[in-house]
Image (spheres, helix red, strand yellow):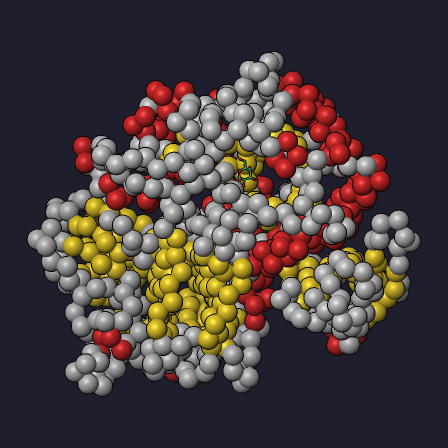
Amino acid sequence: MSSLPLNPGIQYDAERRIWALVTEQSMYAFGVTEENFLLHLHWGGRLHAFSDLSAATLPPERSSLDPALTSSAEEYPPFGGLRYGELAAMVTFADGTRDLDLRFHTVEMGERNGLPTLTVLLQDAIYPLEVRLYYSLDVDNDLIIRSTSFSNTGLDLIALERAFSAMWHLPCQFAPRTLTTLAGQWLSEDQIQQRPLVAGTELIESRTGSTGAIHAPWFAISSSDHEYPGETYFGTLAWSGNWAIRIRTTIFSATAITGGIHDHDFRWELPANAVFETPEFVAGFVQKGMNAARHRLHRYAREHVLPQSHVHMPRPVLYNSWEATSFDVNEPGQRALAERAASLGVELFVVDDGWFQGRNDDHAGLGDWFHDTHKFPNGLTPLITSVHTLGMQFGIWIEPEMVNPDSELYRTHPDWIYHFPRRPRSESRNQLVLNIGREDVQHYLFETLNTLLAEHAIDFVKWDMNRPIAEPGWPEAQQKDHEARELWVRHTRGVYQLMDKLRAAHPHVSIEACSGGGSRADLGVLKRADQIWASDNTNPEARLFIQEGFSLFLPARTMGAWITDNRSRNTIPFSFSSHVAMLGALGIGGNLLHWTNEEMQEIAHWISVYKKIRHLVQDGQQSWLLSPHTHQGNLTAVQFTALDGKEAVVFAFRRQNVFQGHLPHLRLQQLDPTSRYSIRSYPYKDRETSTTLSGAALQQRGLEIALTHTPYDSTILHLHALQRDE
Ligand code: GLA
């Protein structure tokens, strides 16, 4: 039995009670000890046979101060017994007991979200609590998708105080490792942070009620050892509410990563027969570095996360009015912009903030989702009809979770927001947050937004969230049998539910998730949103950094990126800002009424080039060849390659060349070495150039890129494999 080969799929060694989850290039294994503890055995490259693994046994106790359960790599260690390492769960039983003793009970094979899944049932030794660990396997993308559920099988209430999605263990080796995370703020999301992994605990988190920008819910840990270059473990949480990822390393190089819904101000009451499900924590192992990790997560998002009804269609080139008109939105002004946008080749025209009742600035209107009668005396339909007649789809901005005190909604329902009765209600951007966990609020929002979508031919919704939750009180919760602290989870679930219901009622509508830019960017929202507004910062230089970070976990088809007038007082040419925006789902955000004919012609050119290469950008494999952090002439280069390697597009950017240095050759990736490729450029105005080179030459010698010494020069090169006789 134990000499059986470990082929991709879920494998089982019954004799020694070991399970192996084998993907194309990785393997994850755990087993059950004599005492019925579930211990981690391996995560990394593939092994050949079960005999390569030793059975699960508790480690010998080093001393009375290092108990066995603390030094062992448990798959899901609860707070209980002699455990002082990182913990996955904490509960309080009705009699006040806070010690949880989870032991292996049974396993079951099945399917979740179309993926083969192993469910491990753990039970408390005495109390009626069942904990199910789900392990789904994405064989092609080398990913394990984990989540956990808690079921109360008794009569008394059980309170969950920490209920993380999973615990991951790295192999305990003395190899140096580098931790990469993404940190940011408004206007500076997804900045790459790297540091050596040393003994201690790293915490990345959000406590704002949303995904937040302070950290993105993603990590990568790569080997910094020349013996194992490129070995990378990475993971991301599919959750858009409060979350935490804790990465704990001991002095003996044991690293455990755990995370899920944040346990900060968290408490979930589980009555008899109730079940609590955690969000998914997706993780993988690759041997070829960050680009390989990127490819896995991007493919997974396309194949298993994004709304499948829209994922096979190209994301349209959009125009958004925000930077042009701000709140000064009205029918003639938007019509004039729409005409100019259509002439550029724009496919979706989006009216941003400012269209609804009383919305002349950010002091009023949120909550009243009907058109402002002064700005649109004939309603929205005439504008929508003219946008459609111009051949574009129509989109609109909303911020459903919010209310301004100066609104009909708030005047009628001042109790619908999170608050503590004897505390002030802290406003931010003059707005308060609606308690979406309340059924009446859910109902109101669904009815209002459903009517908006039913009465207007709207094709796209930009769903914003511009402030965090504060004073998290829910005074009526106790009467409704809810624990007030559940609101953090209920808020996110409420947003998901609202999006899901609106999508079901209006299946053609697509959604852009936004939170003052990229503060709601994660795989949870992407189950119901087709794209994300990555940042309010549209300066192309800043965008290169933000977009590199975003691309580490989310695919280009989901990354909203605009060409705007934010170009460092026009020192950055339109070509550079267009090329930067073409790395994602292209949009235009400038004031088209101020653009010269020459500028209009140039942007029309870049939009037409984008349409020639967008299948590669939106559905190809994205590799960052040179990071903007590189010092070599400030060069950045990104390659998108068709899955069969026959076609690719390469973007190269040079911000400054203060040393007047030569450019290094760009070594491309993922091409067929034996094919010859035609390489075509798309300069604006100058003649297109075209050369040919073999895949081997492009990957081994590299590609020479013609960039001038002028600041902010950039280029796009489109590669096609030639037929053998061409
Ligand atoms: C947020 C968004 C912007 C814009 C404004 C409108 O800041 O990120 O893109 O929609 O709100 O108020």
Q: Residue furthest right?
A: 687
Residue 313's quadrant in the figure?
top right
Residue 442 visible in image: yes
Residue 709 position in % (x across, y down): 81, 64
Residue in the image at 20% along x and 78% along y: 67
Quarter containing the C terminus: bottom right
Residue 161's quadrant in the figure?
bottom left
Residue in the image at 37% along x and 24% along y: 410
Residue in the image at 71% along x and 47% along y: 569
In this view, 452 is above or below 306? above
Image-based side of 141 in relation to 29, left or right: right
Image-based side of 714 in relation to 393, left or right: right
Residue 138 visible in image: no
Q: Nearer the viewer, residue 701 or 124?
A: 701
In this view, 216 is above or below 397? below
Quarter containing the N terminus: bottom left
Residue 566 position in % (x across, y down): 67, 45
